[in-house]
Amino acid sequence: MNKTSSLGMSPIAILGLAALGVPRVVAHDLGPVGPVVNAVLVFLPVVIWLGVVLWRRVPNPFLTLLAIGGAYGVLLAVAHQLFWGAAFDDPPQLGGNLAGALSPGAEEALMRTFAFGSSLFTGVLVGVVTGLVGWLLARAVPAFRHRDGGGA
């Protein structure tokens, strides 16, 4: 069984679904948006992920949504790095006992590294939570189960 069949969709489809979350990253980094637009940018991509995965009746909704979340985390991390300069009037810095302990370049590299990791973690966490919802819905609603009768 290849990766496409175990996920129930192609890597391009997974990346395309993950990319639906990028407008929220851009809006977050480049300026504030109103609460309604923000809510749409936060929740609509995840609802679409869930809808597509359940509609396609993939073999393992949890795994597929985890893959989408992981891809989203990578896109989130890359976008935050690209918009780093525009996102901050004053870039984040180490504080407390660590303030000034590193050169400015090393401090920025450290902050960017942690931001990248945080973005990856966020994407995977969104994938896990959405995957659990998808898995539960596939188990509870026969119409969402995999065509082979599984759903898990």
Image (tube, rainbow, N blue to C red):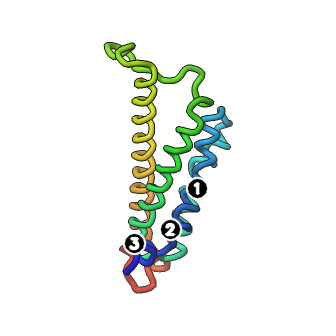
Horizontal placement of 35 versus 96: left or right?
A: right
The residue that label 1 is drawn on is: 19
Q: Quadrant of the C terminus?
A: bottom left
Q: Amino acid at mark 1?
A: Ala
* Left/right of residue 76 with respect to residue 30 in the rendered view: left
Residue at 62% over, 30% down? 86
Q: Which residue is mark 2?
A: 11
Residue 111 sits above or below residue 15 on the image: above
Q: Mark 3 or mark 2, which is nearer the start of the sequence?
A: 2
State the CA–CA distance, disc 1 to disc 3. Answer: 21 Å
Q: Residue at x 44, y 66 (%)?
A: 64
Q: Nearer the viewer, residue 22 or 113?
A: 113
Which residue corresponds to mark 3? 60
Q: Is residue 80 above or below residue 146?
A: above
Q: Residue 5 in the image: state x and y as whole percent.
A: 43, 78
Say which label, 1 or 2, has the lower sequence index: 2
Is residue 113 visible in the rendered structure shown here?
yes
Cα distance in 3D space between marks 1 and 2: 12 Å
